[in-house]
Image (spheres, grey):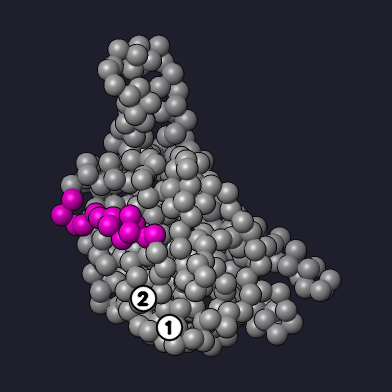
C-alpha cells in the first residue's frame, strides 16, 4: 500500500508536468499557426482555465450606466442581469476571444459517449454502464460530429463512455473529432483496463490527433492495481500525455435506489442549490442532438433498457436541441442557467467507495439499447 501510494504521488508529479508541457505546446502552436496574435493569446488563457470573458462581463455589469439600465427594467431584475451577462459573454466576448464566427456558439465542455458498456462494475455509476450493453456505430457518431461542428465550437471535447476503448472503430471517431474541431482540446477518458490490449493504430490516432488521456482509478486492491499501473506504463511507453483521476476517493451518489435496487432521483427543494453543486455541467452529443447536461441523455438510454425506477418523467420529457435550431436558440438553451430538472439531482454529494456489483451480472445487464 505504501509503495502504491508513493507510486501514485510520483505519477501525479509526472502528470502535472506533462499537462503543463501540453498547454505550453498548444499555446505556441496557436501563436504560430493561427491568424491573430492577440486573439490567440486570450485563447491560451482559456486553455489555462482562466475566465477572462467572465471577468470583463462582470466588470461591465457593475458600470453605473449598465446598473441604471437594469434598475429601469420592469420584471425580474436577476433574470435580466443573467440574460445580459449571456449576451456579453456568448454573443461578443467569448467568440472574439477564441476566434469563433457568428455562425457557431462556443461551449466550454462537449461530451460524446460512443460506448454504453464498461469492463468495470462500479456501484452508483452515473451512466449505469454495468447495466447497459452496446455501442453507437461509427458512421452515426461521425455524422453527429460533422453536423454539430457547424453549430458549436467546444473548448474541450471529451470522448468517454462506458469504456470508449471497447469501440471497434475508435480510430475513425478520434480522426473525425480533430478534423471537425482543429483548435479544441481533445480528451479520451478511460479506466485504463484495456490499454495493454489496444492496437498500435489506437495509440497512433491519439498522438496524431493530439488527444490527452484521462485515466480514472476506481478501486484499490492488488489485482486491480497491477492492471491499472500496467496500462499507465503503456501510456508512458507510447509517450502519450495523460492524467489520473482518483475516482476511488471522489465517487458520489448521483441518484438513489428503491427497494428493488432500481435507480430513483433525488428531490431537492431548491434546484438552485443542486445546480450550483453540480460539476457535471457538460453538454453532450447524443442521438444527433445537443443536450444541456449528461444526465438527460443517459436517463433516456437507461429507460430504453428498462432499468429505471420511478420519478424520472421530468427528464424523460426533456426536449434537446436539434441541428435545425438557430444560433440564438442554442445560446438560450445552453446558457439558460437553472432548469426545472435540476431538482432531481442532490444538493450535497454523498461520497462512497466504488465496489464490484453483483447486480451487473443479472439478466438486466445483458439488455442492449
Against 92, residue 360 (above or below) is: below
Badge 2 is on which residue? 306
Q: Which sits in the foreground, 330 or 256?
A: 256
Quadrant housing the C terminus: bottom left
Against 159, residue 139 (above or below) is: below
Label for residue 364?
1
Q: Residues within 10 Å of mark 1 (few under 14, many from 20)?
A: some
Task: Say whether disc 1 or disc 2 marks the residue closer to the N-terminus.
Answer: 2
Q: Secondary structure at mark 2?
A: loop
The Cα atoms of the two marked residues, 1 and 2, are separated by 8 Å
Q: Which sits in the foreground, 349 or 111?
A: 349
Against 29, residue 354 (above or below) is: below
Residue 353 visible within the image: yes
Quadrant housing the N terminus: bottom right
Q: Quadrant of residue 367?
A: bottom left
Q: Residue at x 51, y 86 (%)?
A: 361
Q: Secondary structure at mark 1?
A: helix
Report if the CB atoms under discs 1 and 2 are less than 8 Å apart: yes
Residue 237 visible within the image: no
Q: Position of residue 9 (x, y in %)?
A: 75, 63
The magenta stretch spans residue 206:
no
Secondary structure character of the magenta stretch overall: loop
Q: Residue at x 71, y 60 (%)?
A: 13
The magenta stretch spans residue 315:
yes
- Magenta part of the protein: which range? 311-325
Q: Position of residue 191 (x, y in %)?
A: 56, 74
Amino acid at each position: 500500500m505504501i509503495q502504491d501510494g508513493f507510486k501514485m504521488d510520483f505519477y501525479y508529479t509526472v502528470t502535472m508536468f506533462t499537462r503543463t508541457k501540453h498547454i505550453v505546446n498548444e499555446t505556441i502552436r496557436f501563436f504560430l499557426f493561427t491568424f491573430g496574435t492577440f486573439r490567440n493569446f486570450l485563447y491560451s488563457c482559456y486553455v489555462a482555465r482562466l475566465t477572462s470573458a467572465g471577468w470583463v462581463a462582470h466588470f461591465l455589469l457593475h458600470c453605473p450606466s449598465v446598473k441604471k439600465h437594469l434598475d429601469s427594467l420592469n420584471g425580474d431584475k436577476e433574470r435580466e442581469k443573467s440574460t445580459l451577462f449571456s449576451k456579453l459573454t456568448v454573443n461578443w466576448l467569448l467568440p472574439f476571444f477564441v476566434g469563433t464566427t457568428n455562425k457557431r456558439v462556443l461551449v466550454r465542455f462537449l461530451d460524446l459517449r460512443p460506448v454504453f458498456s464498461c469492463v468495470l462494475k462500479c456501484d452508483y455509476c452515473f451512466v449505469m454502464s454495468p447495466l447497459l450493453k452496446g455501442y453507437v456505430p461509427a458512421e452515426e457518431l461521425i455524422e453527429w460530429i460533422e453536423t454539430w461542428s457547424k453549430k458549436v465550437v467546444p473548448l474541450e471535447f471529451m470522448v468517454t463512455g462506458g469504456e470508449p476503448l471497447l469501440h471497434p472503430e475508435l480510430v475513425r471517431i478520434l480522426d473525425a473529432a480533430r478534423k471537425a474541431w482543429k483548435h479544441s482540446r481533445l480528451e479520451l477518458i478511460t479506466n485504463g483496463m484495456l490499454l495493454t490490449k489496444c492496437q498500435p493504430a489506437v495509440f497512433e490516432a491519439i498522438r496524431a490527433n493530439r488527444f490527452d488521456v484521462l485515466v480514472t482509478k476506481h478501486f484499490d486492491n492488488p489485482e486491480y492495481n497491477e492492471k491499472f499501473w500496467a496500462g499507465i506504463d503503456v501510456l508512458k511507453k507510447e509517450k502519450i500525455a495523460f492524467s489520473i483521476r482518483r475516482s476511488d476517493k471522489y465517487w458520489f451518489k448521483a441518484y438513489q435506489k428503491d427497494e428493488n435496487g432500481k435507480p430513483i432521483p433525488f428531490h431537492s427543494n431548491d434546484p438552485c442549490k443542486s445546480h450550483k453543486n453540480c460539476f457535471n455541467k457538460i453538454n453532450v452529443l447524443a442521438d444527433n442532438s445537443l443536450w444541456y447536461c449528461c444526465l438527460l441523455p443517459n436517463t433516456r438510454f437507461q429507460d430504453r433498457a428498462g432499468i429505471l425506477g420511478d420519478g424520472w418523467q421530468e427528464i424523460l420529457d426533456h426536449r434537446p436541441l436539434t441541428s435545425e435550431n438557430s444560433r440564438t436558440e442554442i445560446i438560450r438553451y445552453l446558457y439558460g442557467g437553472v432548469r426545472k430538472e435540476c431538482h432531481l439531482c442532490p444538493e450535497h454529494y454523498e461520497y462512497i467507495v466504488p465496489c464490484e456489483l453483483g447486480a451487473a451480472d443479472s439478466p438486466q445487464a445483458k439488455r442492449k439499447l
